[in-house]
Image (cartoon, grey):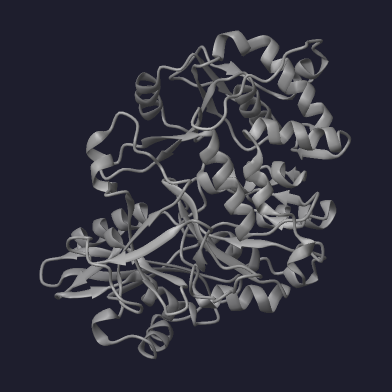
Amino acid sequence: MSSTEYLDWRSVEAADNLVALFEDRAVRHPERLLIADNAIRLSWGDMVRAVRGFGAMYGDHVQDRDVAIFMRNSAAFLTAYLGVLFSGGRAALFNAAMPRVSGARLMEDLGPALILSDHELDFAPDARIIDAATLRDWIQTETNAHSRCGAGDAPSTYFFSGGTTGTPKRILYSQQQVISAGARMQCGWPLRDGEIFLPIAPFSHIYGYLAGICSPLQCGGGSIVPDGFHPAAVLDQIENEKVTVLGGGPPAIYQAMMADSKLKQRDISSLRVCPGGGASFPLEVHRRWKDLTGLTIYEGYGMTEMAPISVNTEINGNRPGTVGKPMPDTFIEVVDLEHGETILPAGEAGEIRIKGPHMMRGYCNNDAETAIVLRNGWVYTGDIGVLDQDGFLSITDRKKDMILHKGFNVFPREVEEALFSHPAVTGVSVVGAPDARAGEIVVAYVTFADGQSASDEDLRSVCRQYLVDYKMPHRIEVLEMLPLTPAGKVDRSALRARAQADAEQV
């Protein structure tokens, strides 16, 4: 496939902001589907009218002010978000299922002029509920409202990242940072005009935002929004709606879809782009997906503080087991773990530090956390990785996930790869649990394909083919399913707590 068939990602950076880019695409194809969920289907022309209707209702109230959005992926979310930007406001994107205490604390810190939601919020009883009926009203509104969206370094969107204290950290992206990040997302996973997307990760998450909001707007495409992630239903939508770009994300998404016993009978021939990211992909997941579907997962790397960072691409090279090469104008270095100042040679593991035009400028109202992560113009990721001679980056593990067993460093991913080599295994997560003698022990949680199983000794047998003794799992536990975070990643914190509780009972 020639690269000339793809849209030029660099043209995206010529836009002043996401709203200007959206309006430009809408003029070209107002009748084309933009987004569909289980409640409403909107064309690009519908969305233009809905966004202007939002501006007529809220524009004066939200201009130059913060607006909190607590919504699941939907046409209502996209409309509300574009409406806030169109009106000159700053959108703060929150997980829709925010707990009461955390939500109240975050609202006290943000002090928004308006709170938008698709359900009642007990910590914000004055939140405005946005649903399909609201969108239809906005579409019917007669108005000459025009965009007040800023450009360049003007503020655009708040995202939230986990912190060392456990409290989410707020990051403000400028209009240009949003455009730069979206352009590099398109560079990593090249697009054609009018792609049909199936977003899975939450729009409030940086990956879900770039893949589910920016990418469709940039290529003039449409999105088919599933009602939650149910593998069989998602496969139905891929077939029926002729989806070309899978929302993808963490390996757990692909593992769940591969566990569908009827996957081989599905007609997913429309599917073209399968992005991967959010967590490291075992090589076995790459192999199984290719065998079952004929499609390649193009794995990338990013974080709320800067995304995307690196990507495997059809054009620039794909090396499974790595997260690809740096994006344009993006710099990656691997430095020593102790001080983070000595640049390590190719092939040697250390902490990954990054910088680029779409990197964060700091955490809002949090100088202490900013000083930990942002040093000397670099973002220190907290990830351990290796750059090879060809510039491909491999993620070994998170620094905080590394297990210290009898003085030896054990990286969970290596143990997970070993367990994944067993054909019955569909999911694996490895964590450390405290141990009085060893410091920490290795605990593995696995899931099996429907109707299949393996004994503890079977699993240990495959591990012995790959692992030295000190890396062997001390305990292997079988689960029906691995716990997931709202972003679709395996919830290591929950598993770590479970492993610790079990260790304390011994």
The quarter in which the N terminus is drawn is bottom right
Q: Is residue 104 visible?
A: yes
Q: Is residue 92 above or below residue 2?
A: above
Residue 127 x/y as whole percent: 53, 16
Query: Which quadrant of the structure image shows residue 348?
Result: bottom left
Q: In the rendered view, does 466 fall on the left or right side of 69?
A: left
Q: In the rendered view, does 184 fall on the left or right side of 477?
A: right
How many dots with numbers?
0
Residue 499 x/y as whole percent: 29, 60
Query: Which quadrant of the structure image shows residue 479?
Result: bottom left
Q: Nearer the viewer, residue 293 or 53?
A: 53
Q: What is the residue that sits farthest to the left in this orientation?
A: 437
The quarter in which the C terminus is drawn is bottom left
Q: Is residue 393 above or below residue 303?
A: below
Q: Is residue 104 above or below residue 270?
A: above
Q: Residue at x 55, y 14 (%)?
A: 62
Q: Residue at x 36, y 52 (%)?
A: 494
Q: Nearer the viewer, residue 101 or 64?
A: 64
Query: Which quadrant of the structure image shows residue 320?
Result: bottom right
Q: In the rendered view, does 404 fall on the left or right side of 393?
A: left
Q: In the rendered view, does 219 fall on the left or right side of 315?
A: right
Q: Nearer the viewer, residue 389 or 132?
A: 389
Residue 58 x/y as whole percent: 62, 12
Q: What is the residue that sits farthest to the right in this orientation?
A: 31
Q: Residue at x 35, y 22 (%)?
A: 109
